[in-house]
Amino acid sequence: MSNEQPDRFSDRELQAMAEPPPHAREEPAASLHSALTMAEAKKFLDFSPDALIIVDALGLMVLVNSQAAALFGYAEAELVRQPLEMLLPARFHTAHVAHRLDYATAPLPRPMGVGLDLVGRRKDGSEFPVDISLRPVLLEQAFHVVGAIRDITVQRFLERERAVQTERISQLTALIDLAHDAIQVQDPLGRILLWNRGAEELYGWTAQEALGRVAHVLLQTHFPESQAAVDAELERAGSWEGELVQTDRQGRALVVDCRRVLIRDEHSHPAAIFVIARDITERRRQEQAQAAVYTETLAQRAFLQELLDALPSGVSVVHGHEARLLLTNHAAASIWGAPWPVGQPMRAFLEERHIRLVEASGRALREDAWATMRALLDGETVLQHQEVIRQPSGASVPVLVNAVPLTSAHWQSLGVQDEQGRGQPGHKGIREPLALVIYQDVRLLKEAEYFKEEFIGITAHELRQPLAVLKVAVGTLLRQTARGHGTKLSSWQQEMLQDLDQATDRLTDLTDDLLDVSRLQAGRLSLQRAVTDLVSLTQRVVKRFQQTASRHHLEFSSDQARLEAEVDTRRIEQVLTNLLTNAVKYSPQGGPVQVTLSTRAAARSVEIRVQDGGIGIPAYQQARIFGRFMRADNAQAAGIGGTGLGLYLCRALVEQHGGQLWFESTEGVGSTFFTTLPLSPDVSSSGEAQSGPWAKRHQRKM
Ligand code: ADP
């Protein structure tokens, strides 16, 4: 509030005030009211309820009524003969004097300061908004002006309030129209008072069409129980929420999620109902469709479970990098010896139940070697993987495991739902690996196999004795005949004896092989290792062969003069003999057979290669050629005899030495068999190794 004194006028102002306006002095305006006396005027002023002030031509207040004095906080006497400007803030003084003088030039009754915010100043310095009407009067025959002053503080406040309210309402209306939801305001009888754009879009009626209509009639609303129940709840709780079925302008049924709020007036009487509705027709339709699919999927899953439980093999479906169980069957539980809970990772299950997965040899199987993990992590299809399950009870269950990676498309068809909702109808974007794992309990097979091995072993063993007797007898007969002892045999008898001798040899070889196989199966085939020079050993075998194989030309070469390895000489000889026998036997037309020894310095091993130009092995049988009793079709078709045990034994023997045996073959072109064997640690000191393994080749024709 300004504190300036009412009498602080500039000299110019005071002078201007002292001068009566020219018109007032010279020719009083015709419109002036008829002359009043001061006493009459005073009476009139006191009688009026308004604050009135009469100012003379000099701008001095000549009459002030009590209302005016009270309005400005003065006593009447304090104002009389004082300049009018003392009732204004000082900042308006100059302008006011100018206005006043200006008014005197055209003194008509009019409100003062149109378009201006007029401000009064009380005695205490406080200011307030005023509205002033001016009217010229002739008082005591002189020009005066009556001013009626009204304090418009309250009016201004109300105006401001109204402006704010108007602004709020217009913002609210804009917001209501912006909302996607259908918004209505209804009167307590349900007649529509407000209908936003969302309502127009949802129901199809424009605001113009909808306003004034009864909402539930227009929209043919079906209430969950009854309209009365909804109204009662609205009345009781002030709001209601629920689903309604309504009909739009086109007659389509809509399902809406609806909220209603009751608005009460200051007397707590219902004034209006605020209604928000959201269209959930499509969502409900989708949910219903999904629910139907889900129910069907569950039924499929139950059927699948029934099927699985009827299977004799253990079946599990696992997912993710931890192999969490999705689905399993009864047989699996009996193979594990414990039930595997759905959702549990495989390792956690095995640890919790003290179950171990081991190799056939009894060595623990590394997690990444489990058929299940290979299928899940590498996407590999693992077939007939031998694993042994050590059950919680300690029992061992040998199993053959088939693990097949599945694609994500299988999730749904499995009817499976995991903890993240995957596999639920409508679920998309599954990236976790999934695998089907089948465990075949081979305990019975193993037992049968064991008995078979036992039988073969015993039979072979029992055959050896009579065969040895036969061999000795035939040998003696042949030798004695050759020396001319005893009865002379005819030539056909001698031929028969020789056939008998060869057949005995073949039978002996077969029983030897069978015995080896049964020893191998039982893990009883042990090696008698000794440091041996592989160059001379191989050379010896090749030489022996060359003596009998007249139609074949055997070549031997080695990059070293001497190659020492710790091997079972008899067994390595057996391997080489077998490979050479095959090379000769399966190239019936004759031809070269090359035997090559070469060192692999980095791997500290030797590679023995036996190459022939014979009938070769058909590609479609190559993968199985190392199997027991496995013979290729072309060998049998060519009438070449054999048992199919040699290669099986050779590979086992070489692997037992820490080496490897494999081959490359083209049917009709020939075969090359490769054998690697680890060398003794001091190989660098032997032969030519110091000057480089490939420096000089030792080549000899046999
Ligand atoms: P077999 O007593 O039948 O020779 P093996 O186990 O030694 O038994 O060989 C298995 C099969 O592999 C043979 O029957 C033959 O079909 C094939 N085979 C082995 N070596 C050769 C070779 N050098 N050339 C062609 N086929 C071979």
Image (cartoon, helix red, strand yellow):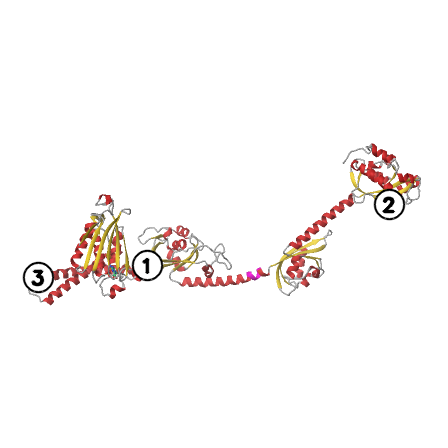
Determine contact: label 3, label 1, CB under 8 Å: no
> Magenta part of the protein: which range?
283-287
* Residue type marked 1: Arg
* Residue type marked 3: Ala
Magenta segment main secondary structure: helix
Structural distance between the alpha carbons of marks 2 and 3: 171 Å
User: Which mark is first along the chain, 2 or 1?
Assistant: 2
The x and y percentages for residue 535 are 20, 50
The x and y percentages for residue 638 are 24, 65
| Quadrant assignment, res 33 | top right
State the residue at coordinates (25%, 65%): 636
438 or 585, which lies in front?
585
Determine contact: label 1, label 2, CB under 8 Å: no
User: Which mark is first along the chain, 3 or 2?
Assistant: 2
Locate residue 600 relative to residue 25 in the image: left or right.
Answer: left
The x and y percentages for residue 597 are 23, 51
Q: Which residue is mark 3?
A: 482
| Quadrant assignment, res 381 | bottom left
Q: Which residue is mark 2?
A: 109
452 or 415, which lies in front?
415
| Residue 416 is one of the magenta-drawn residues | no
Q: Which residue is mark 1?
A: 443
The x and y percentages for residue 620 are 31, 62
Q: Quadrant of the N terminus?
A: top right
| Quadrant assignment, res 612 | bottom left
User: Which mark is first along the chain, 1 or 3?
Assistant: 1
